[in-house]
Image (cartoon, rainbow, N blue to C red):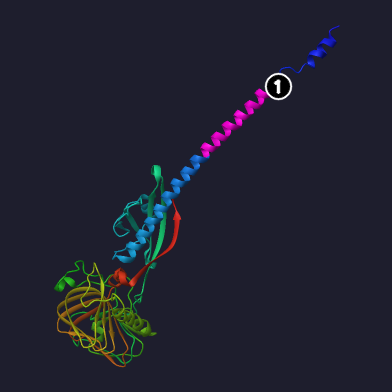
Amino acid sequence: MRFPQLMKTARNEKGVVLVVAVMLLAVLVLVGFTAAIMTSTDSKISANYRRSNEAFFNADAGVETVLAYLRTNTVTYPTVDATPSIINGGTCPAGQCVQLSMTVPSGYAFSGTVNLYGYNVANRRFVFRMTGTGSNNATRTIETYIRKNTSVPENADGAVAMYGGGPQVAFKKGGGGGYAVDGHDYPVPANPNCNGSACSTSPTGLPAIPGLFTVMAPTTTGNVSAHLGGVPTQTMGISREAEYNAFAQMIIDSGGTGAPLYQTTLGTRANPAVTVIPNGSTLNGSGNGAGIIIVEDGGSLQINGNFEYEGLVILRGSGRVFGSGTGNIYGSLVTVSHLSKLIDLTGSINLFYSSAALANLSNIGALNSVQRVAWRDVQ
């Protein structure tokens, strides 16, 4: 009977150690291979993460470069909101976008050309995208939303707004010559260096503001109905004298602390500026200009020849505008700090409200600040 022999063979353990060793070796090889794969994958993930971070930090540096550029340069911002398809497509149509050229510092890698788009132009919000590059051509793109803040008083109350006491306006006596003060919205002339009749424009169909705004009943003479326009032609309301005085004083005070915020010559449409006419001084206004004119108490703006100005004129105290020339002022004229004030329009000086002229004041770089309000990683 062979049963005992079979039992003896079954109890024979020779070769088991070899099998176990082979199995253990296989497990170790598998573990080692898995560990090698994981290490390689982790290294790749780590390398990709570093490259992506490098690209992101370059993009962030590019964003800061754009913000610094906007804060220190005169930029003509978009005037129309861009559509999402325009922004996503990267095109730059006029009106919806302006293109900026950045200087990329050594050691950084980001876009040198940036498209600045209108996002919510009515509230001075804009957007741009900045792409940074890392090793192995890794890229990251940051979309940044900005708001342009300005220290200039906003929202004109009238083509002429007289916030002080005793307001008086002398209009022409005849019916010819059209409006001298009009709150209908006038576009600025096509040519910023226009002359004579080429500086005259016609009002648009946009909503109008009052032609004459005062804080107490004004005294008017001449043919008011023929030479005063707006919706309504005149009205009374709350004084903003303190706001305009604070703004003007801030400008004046800057003359004694570092670089002044104003100059003694007129700005241009491309580079609007603040001009101050101090007490005892007269600026002979002729030709063309744009920006803000502050006529201090005792100062005068004398209009000679043909004069076309776009922006805001502030008359403080006895500061005045006069002359025998033909002058069109597009924007708004404001008077403050007076107990009695006469604006004499019996000559050929026209004061027309213009939203375009006032909007251009936001391009006076020294009076503006750029605030980053939001951002997102889009790539």
Specify start and end residues of the magenta stretch as a single range: 17-41
Residue 70, magenta (yes or no)? no
Name the quarter where the N terminus is drawn. top right
Can you tell which quarter of the image residue 315 is in? bottom left
Specify whether residue 42 is in view. Answer: yes
In the rendering, at what x and y percent does residue 248 appear? Answer: 32, 81
- Position of residue 129 relative to residue 175, above or below, is above
Q: Residue furthest right?
A: 1
How many circles with numbers are drawn on the protein? 1
Residue count near mark 1 (Cα–Cα under 10 Å), binned few <14, some 14–19, many ≥20: few
Mark 1 sits on what residue?
17
Residue nearest the viewer, comparing 292 with 213:
292
Specify whether residue 211 is in view. Answer: no
Can you tell which quarter of the image residue 243 is in? bottom left
Residue 29, magenta (yes or no)? yes
- Position of residue 99 relative to residue 339, above or below, is above
In the rendering, at what x and y percent does residue 138 appear? Answer: 41, 45
Which is the main secondary structure of the residues drawn in magenta? helix
Q: Residue at x 16, y 79 (%)?
A: 326
In the rendering, at what x and y percent does residue 80 appear? Answer: 34, 62
Residue nearest the viewer, comparing 90 with 369:
369
Amino acid type indicated by mark 1: Val
Q: Residue at x 38, y 50 (%)?
A: 132
- Position of residue 97 relative to residue 240, above or below, is above
Q: Residue at x 35, y 63 (%)?
A: 68
Q: Give SS at disc 1.
A: helix
Can you tell which quarter of the image residue 336 is in? bottom left
